[in-house]
Image: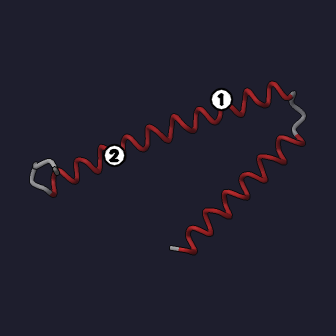
Amino acid sequence: MRRFVMFVLGMGAGVAAGVGLAMLFTPASGDKLRKEAQDYYEQLLTEARKAAEERRKTLETELTDLTGGKKPA
């Protein structure tokens, strides 16, 4: 588990460094770049929320099946 956490942290640091370098060396204007970054972030957030909701529904269905239709207290 520790190796996985370290891997995820390393990936996060790599992504952050890549984003920082891209922002420094991109020929686009600052306002345009910020708008595109914000739009991309909002798109990712929307997709993550949708995936989380779908997974929650799947898990709730599995829990209901496992408990014989009874809702946990």
Name the residue located 81 percent from the left edge and 47 percent from the top edge: 20
Q: Is residue 18 above or below residue 47?
A: below
> Within the image, what quadrant is residue 44 found in?
top right
Name the residue located 90 percent from the left edge and 34 percent from the top edge: 27
Element on which disc 1 rests: helix
Instruction: Name which residue type carries label 1.
Output: Asp
Q: Which mark is residue 4?
A: none
In the picture, measured across the screen, residue 7 lies left or right of residue 53, that is right
Q: CA distance from mark 2 to mark 1?
A: 26 Å
Q: x and y percent of residue 47 in the render?
A: 50, 38
Instruction: Name which residue type carries label 2.
Output: Arg
Q: x and y percent of residue 11 in the render?
A: 67, 60
Q: Is residue 41 above or below residue 31?
A: below
Name the residue located 64 percent from the left edge and 62 percent from the top edge: 9
Q: Is residue 39 above or below residue 7?
A: above
User: How many residues crowd around disc 1 within 10 Å: few (fewer than 14), some, or many (20 or more)?
Assistant: few
Name the residue located 63 percent from the left edge and 36 percent from the top edge: 41
In the picture, measured across the screen, residue 6 lies left or right of residue 17, that is left
Q: Which mark is residue 39?
A: 1
* Residue that carries the numbered disc 2 in the rendered image: 56
- Type of colouring: secondary structure
